[in-house]
């Protein structure tokens, strides 16, 4: 574990309290109306920005889930090492994405920086306390949690598809998360993609080559994909 991460866990955060004008509130249900304070603003006020070099661990599986994270720049992967030594990637997080939200007391997966990455780190107890006082922020947290659950459900369905369907689905997913453009920049390696899709790296490479031959995509570089025919990819996605 990096020294900077250990320092965060051993030192108290300076938490900026909410405005004194905010009355105490019971934790609201998802969809409740509330104050106009954004989750992003609250996290910036309460958190600290930390830098991680390529492949540095941010947190480990089964460690106490004491912090919530938001990607400022760079990208993050979450993963689990299976009993036979294989790695299963749970998700990729890009700038603006929140990760580390847990229902239990410990992290279910490990998290690493894919490249040089900056993340905003917020103490979980302060995060939860603010959500209990501010209905608008609680609503945003509900939305983030809902997106995570939908992504998990989509992954379960993805793993029963063919290799071509998995790769097409992945490219469409990354395109949806990128700025409006047919150019998709992939911060992760082919091995990362393979471990995310439950395929071998050879299968991922062959499938991308086949999609390029079918004029569905173009591959200017190994990390840049041009979507030439989204309709074809959507048909392949099933």
Image: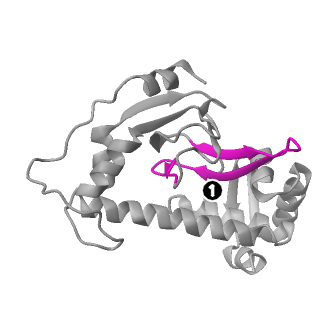
Q: Give yes or no for residue 101 being in the magenta stretch.
A: yes
Quarter-of-image position of residue 124: top left
Name the image colouring: one colour
Identify the image quadrant of the C terminus. Answer: bottom right
Compared to residue 231, the image places residue 6 above or below, namely: above
Percent of width and height locating residue 149: 56, 66
Total labels: the figure holds: 1
Compared to residue 18, the image places residue 216 above or below, namely: below
Residue located 69% across and 46% down the image: 79
Percent of width and height locating residue 109: 65, 46
Res. 227 in view: no
> What residue range appears in magenta?
75-102
Identify the image quadrant of the N terminus. Answer: top right
Compared to residue 209, the image places residue 12 above or below, namely: above
Q: Give yes or no for residue 17 being in the magenta stretch.
A: no
Name the residue nearer the viewer: 160 or 6.
Answer: 6
Residue 107 left/right relative to 79? left
Quarter-of-image position of residue 27: bottom left
Residue at the extreme top: 3
Residue 213 left/right relative to 109? right
Percent of width and height locating residue 61: 65, 40
Name the residue nearer the viewer: 110 or 221.
Answer: 110
């Amino acid at each position: 574990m990096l020294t900077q991460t250990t320092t965060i866990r051993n030192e108290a955060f300076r938490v900026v309290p909410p405005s004194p004008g905010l009355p105490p509130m019971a934790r609201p249900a998802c969809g409740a109306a509330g104050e106009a304070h954004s989750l992003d603003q609250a996290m910036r006020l309460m958190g600290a920005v930390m830098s991680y070099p390529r492949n540095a661990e941010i947190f480990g599986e089964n460690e106490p889930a004491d912090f919530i994270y938001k990607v400022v720049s760079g990208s993050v992967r979450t993963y689990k090492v299976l009993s036979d030594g294989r790695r299963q990637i749970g998700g990729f997080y890009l700038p603006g994405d929140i990760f580390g939200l847990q229902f239990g007391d410990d992290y279910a997966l490990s998290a690493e920086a894919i490249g040089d990455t900056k993340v905003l780190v917020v103490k979980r107890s302060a995060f939860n306390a603010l959500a209990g006082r501010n209905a608008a922020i609680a609503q945003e947290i509900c939305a983030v949690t809902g997106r995570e659950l939908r992504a998990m459900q989509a992954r379960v369905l993805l793993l029963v598809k063919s290799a071509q369907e998995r790769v097409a689905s992945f490219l469409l997913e990354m395109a949806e998360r990128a700025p409006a453009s047919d150019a998709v920049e992939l911060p992760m390696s082919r091995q990362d993609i393979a471990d995310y899709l439950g395929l071998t790296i050879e299968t991922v490479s062959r499938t991308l080559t086949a999609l390029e031959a079918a004029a569905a995509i173009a591959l200017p570089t190994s990390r840049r994909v041009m979507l030439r025919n989204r309709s074809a990819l959507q048909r392949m996605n099933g």
